[in-house]
Image (spheres, rainbow, N blue to C red):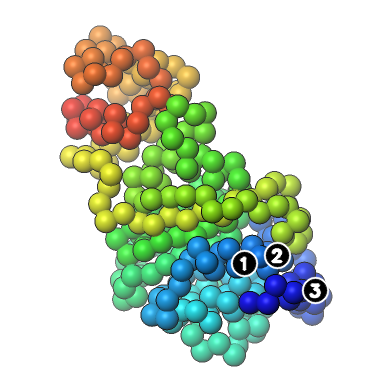
């Protein structure tokens, strides 16, 4: 893709042509930086036989580049007018299908006939976390996800234990995939300009989780309870959240080598796995 291509100019032309006013409150910020798009394409590492889901097809400018590299691109766009615009812009691409559909309403069962696929998306900031957790529910078919998210969310996703950013989102994503931050995108990379810096992250879905858990539901329930009051000692939080006596919880934690006075943010994924395997609730 030429580095001198004026994405800003093309974006403004399309917005004027179709009389569309982006709604910042809905996260409608269009990528206008060609080097940022190059980073996305490189991170996605698309091959000719790949099926790609794009979350938010927008004006279709990134979609075009995905379509040149993949077997099929299915774009999900919830905004009716944007959906219509991208369908017109992409009319010449026979391997592109734009659906007017909320990605949060798409279930794994809807994807059964498509086999394995990759995801690329510039996620609306206000629903980033729900979308990511929805993607994790697709992990049996999802190969990888390359996502542009708010920098603050990216830091939470990649955070190791012991940091204030570490929490439910960190463990949820890292349990299902190997995740890394690829780059930060300045506000000026988007039009209209958002209020925050964005980051590009890539998640490669794991063949199996990095820790052994007997009951996945129990594991994530314990994680949620543990972080429900993240500044309090673990024994107090679990006793209240699981309706156990504090003494019983403290004894169980001590038996598996976890200090009852520790806080949830200091526990590794392995610690949570040991706890969930020992404490079935």
Q: Do the CB atoms of the residues marked 2 and 1 lie less than 8 Å apart? A: yes
- In this rendering, the answer to whether 177 lies above or below 87 is above
Q: Nearer the viewer, residue 95 or 197?
A: 197
SS at badge 3: helix
**Reading the chain from its start, which is encountered first: label 1 or label 3?**
3
Disc 3 to disc 2: CB gap under 8 Å: no
Read off the residue under disc 3: 9
At mark 1, the secondary structure is helix
Picture quadrant where residue 98 is located: bottom right
Q: Residue at x 54, y 41 (%)?
A: 155
Give the side of residue 109 with respect to residue 251, left or right.
right
From the top left corner, tell me how far across and down residue 143 is, in percent: 36, 63
**What's the residue at 21%, 21% (across, down)?**
256
In the rendered image, is residue 84 in sight? no
Quadrant occupied by the C terminus: top left
Mark found first going from the N terminus, 3 or 2: 3
At 80% across and 73% down in the image, what residue appears? 9
Q: What separation in Å lies between label 2 and label 1 (alpha carbons)?
A: 7 Å
Residue extending furthest toward the top:
247
13 versus 198 height, above or below: below
What residue is shown with label 1? 37
Please name the residue that numbered disc 2 is placed on. 33
Q: Nearer the viewer, mark 3 or mark 2?
A: 2
């Amino acid at each position: 893709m030429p580095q001198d291509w004026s994405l800003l100019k093309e974006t403004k032309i399309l917005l004027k042509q179709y009389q569309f006013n982006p709604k910042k409150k809905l996260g409608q910020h269009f990528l206008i930086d060609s080097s940022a798009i190059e980073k996305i394409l490189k991170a996605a590492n698309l091959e000719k036989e790949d099926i790609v889901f794009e979350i938010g097809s927008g004006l279709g400018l990134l979609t075009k580049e995905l379509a040149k590299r993949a077997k099929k691109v299915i774009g999900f766009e919830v905004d009716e007018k944007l959906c219509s615009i991208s369908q017109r812009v992409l009319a010449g691409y026979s391997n592109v299908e734009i659906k007017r559909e909320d990605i949060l309403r798409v279930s794994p069962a809807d994807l059964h006939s498509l086999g394995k696929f990759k995801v690329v998306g510039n996620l609306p900031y206000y629903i980033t976390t729900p979308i990511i957790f929805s993607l994790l529910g697709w992990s049996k078919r999802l190969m990888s996800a390359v996502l542009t998210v708010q920098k603050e969310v990216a830091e939470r996703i990649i955070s190791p234990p012991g940091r204030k950013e570490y929490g439910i989102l960190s463990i949820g994503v890292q349990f299902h995939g190997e995740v890394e931050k690829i780059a930060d995108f300045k506000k000026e990379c988007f039009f209209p300009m958002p209020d925050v810096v964005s980051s590009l992250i890539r998640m490669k879905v794991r063949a199996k989780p990095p820790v052994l858990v007997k009951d996945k539901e129990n594991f994530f329930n314990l994680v949620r309870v543990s972080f429900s009051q993240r500044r309090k000692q673990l024994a107090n939080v679990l006793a209240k959240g699981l309706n156990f006596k504090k003494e019983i919880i403290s004894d169980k934690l001590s038996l598996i080598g976890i200090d009852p006075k520790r806080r949830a943010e200091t526990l590794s994924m392995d610690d949570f796995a040991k706890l969930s395997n020992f404490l079935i609730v």
